[in-house]
Image (spheres, rainbow, N blue to C red):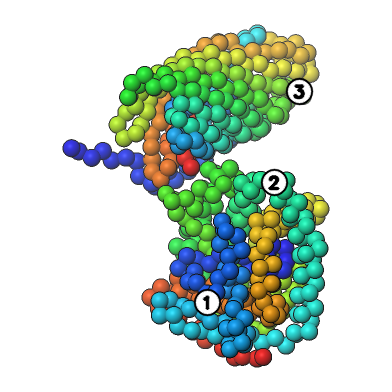
């Protein structure tokens, strides 16, 4: 929710690595000057097409456009739908109005700088995840990014590392992906209040990222809360409209978000595994990570 | 034609490590004056830097207070047209006065601006002005139980220089500068080593003029190394690594 687009998706708006950004069947661009985030792009499905495919998603992996279908068990659907509704209301009644006010007051370059700052603080989780995935090049890239952005990026407010010359791109990974790369299955779908769509495996990521987030160690608690709210409101202000676009394009938003989430995480883990085991095929199915069992 | 090899990428990290790990405790006047021609893009852009300077000076009164400081600072600058630049610095500096007063790091802030005018393709003249203020007071206990404070320390520098372009994009610059520094010294009782009785004194720098010279070398990937020496009453020197956006 607080991540700004889809309610509760703490992972949902992290862009995929460049090599994994092959276009989905239908891409709805919500902002003319900024592409729709990958989560939304993956989720927006032509209703006519959905008539034939149900709530499965097509994933065009690589040049051969091989179709992969991803689904997830949803034994807690009544609870999840209630939480989805709660997060939806929280977005429209609290987060969005505050983010719109914030957006009206704070110019976009400043909001991007704040976003860079908090992204830089996410270094420990990304660095550790890379190490745990034996992605030493990724870990070194993260360490270089953190050093350069902290020292020459004015504490992380600027992001010189992503420039053309340095080209040290942020490693799009977390502890949930680490478990996925290790072969841990995703389990069932669960929607947490405030945190949004998740699985038991990705819930580990929420907990782990909390302990690896420097903001979590701020005292007193009110300062911690304030900084976290700033982070989330700032992030939301940069993505106003994405969530609405996805919701409006879906016949059943709950199903759309669920499938978009699982599709998005699947692609992220696949990208990580393809990167780490670059000799093997990116399209190779994971034995445990994503089970193609359809439950609906 | 023989190709000139410029400094490799890894030097950025080695030099940064040197700045961090060989300079001891952190850093007073605040940093280098730097080359006068901005390293920012011609159509306007940002550059940032991290720098270190070892600073020595003498303040008047009594036997003269010889001060030593280590400064570390971060700088953000905006410049354009290869002609002008404004910059802000935030850093920390320690302070030693003689052999008896030692204070660990306090925060300082500096603002400055510089202009450059190219006389020919390889030669130009520039001028700068820079002011520094210490946001915290320095305090220590000397000669047992005698509490000493140096409060409201500030300085202002103004200088002009000639700047020459060297091969490989390096630049060299040198010139004179004027400066004024002032602080309030507060003593709880007499300090015999300095010849001061208890009370409050305004102290200023002994010399008001000095000279400086420096070298600015491109490294790689937008990084540059700047080394500089300054001499007024005593010698100061430092280095900074900048990054151009």
Disc 3: which residue: B147
Q: What numbered label is drawn on residue A161?
A: none
Residue nearer the viewer, B104 or A250: A250
* Left or right of residue A2, residue A181 in this image: left
- Say above or below: A51 vs B127: below
Judged from the image, the secondary structure of the residue bearing numbered disc 3 is strand
Residue B83 in the image: state x and y as whole percent.
46, 26
Between disc 3 and disc 2, the foreground one is 2
Mark 3 and mark 2: span between their CA atoms?
Answer: 46 Å
Taking the spot 70% from the left edge, 86% from the top edge, the residue there is A74
- Say above or below: A36 vs B191: below
Judged from the image, the secondary structure of the residue bearing numbered disc 2 is loop
Taking the spot 76% from the left edge, 14% from the top edge, the residue there is B200
Q: Are marks 3 and 1 in contact (CB under 8 Å)?
A: no
Instruction: Name the chain under label 3.
Output: B
Disc 2: which residue: A106
Between disc 3 and disc 1, the foreground one is 1
Residue B183 in the image: state x and y as whole percent.
68, 18
- Say above or below: B68 vs A19: above
- Say above or below: A229 vs B86: below
Residue A6 picture quarter:
bottom right
Mark 1 and mark 2: span between their CA atoms?
Answer: 36 Å
What quarter of the picture does the C terminus of chain A occupy?
Answer: bottom right
Crowd class of label 3 (few under 14; some 14 to 19; many from 20; radius 10 Å):
some
Between disc 1 and disc 2, the foreground one is 1
Disc 1: which residue: A25
């Amino acid at each position: 929710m607080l991540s700004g687009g889809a309610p509760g998706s703490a992972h949902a708006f992290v862009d995929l690595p460049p090599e994994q950004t092959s276009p989905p069947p239908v891409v709805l661009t919500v902002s003319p000057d900024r592409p729709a985030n990958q989560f939304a792009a993956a989720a927006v499905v032509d209703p006519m097409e959905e008539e034939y495919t149900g709530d499965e998603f097509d994933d065009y992996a690589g040049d051969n456009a091989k179709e992969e279908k991803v689904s997830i068990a949803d034994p807690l659907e009544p609870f999840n739908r209630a939480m989805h509704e709660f997060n939806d209301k929280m977005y429209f009644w609290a987060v969005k109005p505050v983010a719109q006010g914030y957006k009206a007051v704070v110019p976009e370059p400043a909001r991007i700088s704040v976003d860079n700052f908090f992204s830089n603080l996410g270094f420990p989780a990304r660095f550790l995840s890379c190490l745990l995935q034996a992605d030493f090049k990724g870990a070194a890239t993260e360490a270089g990014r953190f050093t350069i952005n902290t020292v020459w990026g004015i504490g992380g407010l600027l992001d010189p590392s992503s420039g053309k010359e340095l080209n040290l791109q942020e490693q799009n990974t977390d502890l949930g992906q680490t478990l996925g790369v290790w072969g841990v299955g995703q389990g069932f779908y669960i929607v947490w209040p405030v945190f949004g769509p998740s699985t038991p495996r990705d819930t580990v990521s929420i907990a782990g990222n909390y302990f690896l987030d420097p903001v979590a160690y701020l005292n007193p608690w009110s300062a911690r809360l304030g900084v976290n709210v700033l982070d989330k409101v700032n992030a939301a202000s940069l993505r106003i409209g994405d969530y609405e676009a996805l919701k409006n394009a879906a016949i059943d938003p709950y199903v759309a978000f669920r499938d978009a989430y699982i599709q998005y995480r699947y692609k992220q883990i696949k990208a990580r595994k393809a990167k780490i085991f670059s000799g093997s095929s990116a399209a190779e199915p994971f034995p445990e990570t994503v089970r193609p069992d359809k439950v609906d | 034609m023989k190709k000139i090899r410029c400094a490799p990428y890894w030097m950025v990290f080695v030099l940064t490590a040197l700045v961090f790990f060989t300079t001891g405790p952190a850093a007073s006047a605040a940093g280098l004056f730097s080359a006068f021609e901005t390293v920012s893009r011609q159509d306007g852009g940002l550059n940032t830097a991290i720098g270190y300077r070892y600073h020595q000076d003498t303040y008047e009164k009594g036997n003269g207070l010889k001060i030593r400081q280590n400064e570390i600072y971060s700088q953000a600058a905006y410049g354009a047209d290869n002609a002008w630049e404004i910059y802000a610095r935030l850093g920390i500096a320690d302070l030693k006065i003689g052999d008896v007063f030692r204070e660990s790091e306090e925060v300082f802030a500096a603002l400055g601006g510089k202009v450059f005018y190219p006389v020919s393709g390889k030669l130009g003249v520039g001028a700068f002005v820079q002011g520094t203020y210490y946001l915290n007071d320095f305090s220590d206990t000397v000669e047992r139980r005698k509490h000493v404070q140096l409060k409201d320390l500030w300085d202002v520098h103004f200088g002009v220089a000639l700047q020459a372009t060297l091969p490989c994009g390096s630049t060299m610059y040198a010139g004179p500068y004027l400066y004024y520094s002032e602080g309030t010294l507060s003593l709880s009782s007499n300090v015999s080593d300095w010849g001061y009785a208890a009370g409050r004194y305004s102290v200023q720098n002994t010399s008001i003029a000095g000279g400086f010279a420096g070298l600015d070398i491109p490294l790689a990937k937008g990084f540059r190394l700047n080394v500089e020496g300054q001499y007024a009453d005593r010698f100061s020197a430092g280095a900074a690594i900048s990054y151009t956006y």
